[in-house]
Amino acid sequence: MASLSRLLSCTVLAAALLPVCGYSQEVRVGAPAPAFTATDSRGQTESLAQYRGKYVVLEWHNQGCPFTRKHYVSGNMQALQKEWTAKGVVWFTVISSAPGQQGYVTPSQESSYLEEMHAVPTAVLMDSDGKVGRLYNAKTTPQMIVIDPSGKVIYDGAIDDRPTPDPEDVRGARNYVSDALTEAMAGKPVQTAFTRPYGCGVKYPE
């Protein structure tokens, strides 16, 4: 039974990763982060420029993706949000699913989800036209970007080194986002600045 479960997990993983086969790093880490303005789930306008001088995390999100659910069901994503926003980091959850596509939600649906999951990002960017996602070449949910106070991208890629949908795999995983923020805040270079993201393909407008 355990073997069958592992086989099914691998099959789901392979299917979810299929859209990013051949993924290669954009020339972005160390470069200025693309400027953006977006409306959040509360109807407020958010822009990268208004948070100049702060660390910013971008988290691509899809409620229905098993790889995203892994980090919310386990409480891992919420714990990261609480830890780092308490240290002054701005945390944007970004939803780039197009209307009619899997993962698309209305602002009220997302607000209910945040309450249900006890999630505490700074804001949720409703990116249904895909403009923010395409600016950052976001491929998967989750995919994580870290931007430093000078406005440069210092990390781009996976949330951790366990590319499975199993919540149990959160324990003992190396969290690349925490590593990047910890190193950067200590004045050290980010040792792992890019990894291949894993998860479900972002459902952009066609």
Image: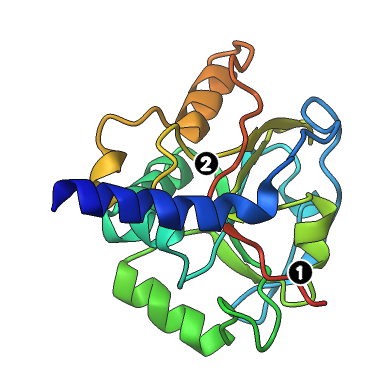
Residue under the point 41% across and 72% down: 114
Give coordinates of residue 165: x percent, y percent: 37, 53
Residue behind mark 2: 88
Number of the label disc, if any, that sits on residue 38: 1
Residue under the point 59% across and 48% down: 143
Q: Is residue 114 left or right of residue 121?
A: left
Judge by depth and name the residue closer to the eye, 135 or 121. 135
Judge by depth and name the residue closer to the eye, 187 or 202. 202
Q: Which of marks 1 and 2 is nearer the N terminus?
A: 1
Query: Callout 2: few (<14), some (14-19), or many (20+) C-alpha neighbours within 10 Å?
Result: few
Instruction: Give residue 93's quadrant in the image.
Output: bottom right
Q: How many marks?
A: 2
As measured in the structure, the alpha-carbon distance from the residue carrying label 1 to the one carrying label 2 is 21 Å
Query: Callout 1: few (<14), some (14-19), or many (20+) C-alpha neighbours within 10 Å?
Result: some
Disc 1 marks a residue whose amino acid type is Ala
On screen, 191 above or below 16?
above
Residue under the point 32% across and 69% down: 117
Q: Is residue 63 left or right of residue 118?
A: right
Give coordinates of residue 123: x percent, y percent: 57, 64
Residue under the point 21% across and 46% down: 3
- Residue 49 visible in the current orientation: yes
- Residue 142 visible in the current orientation: no
Q: Specify the farthest residue to the top.
A: 188
Quadrant of the snapshot with the C terminus: bottom right
The local secondary structure at tag 1 comes to strand
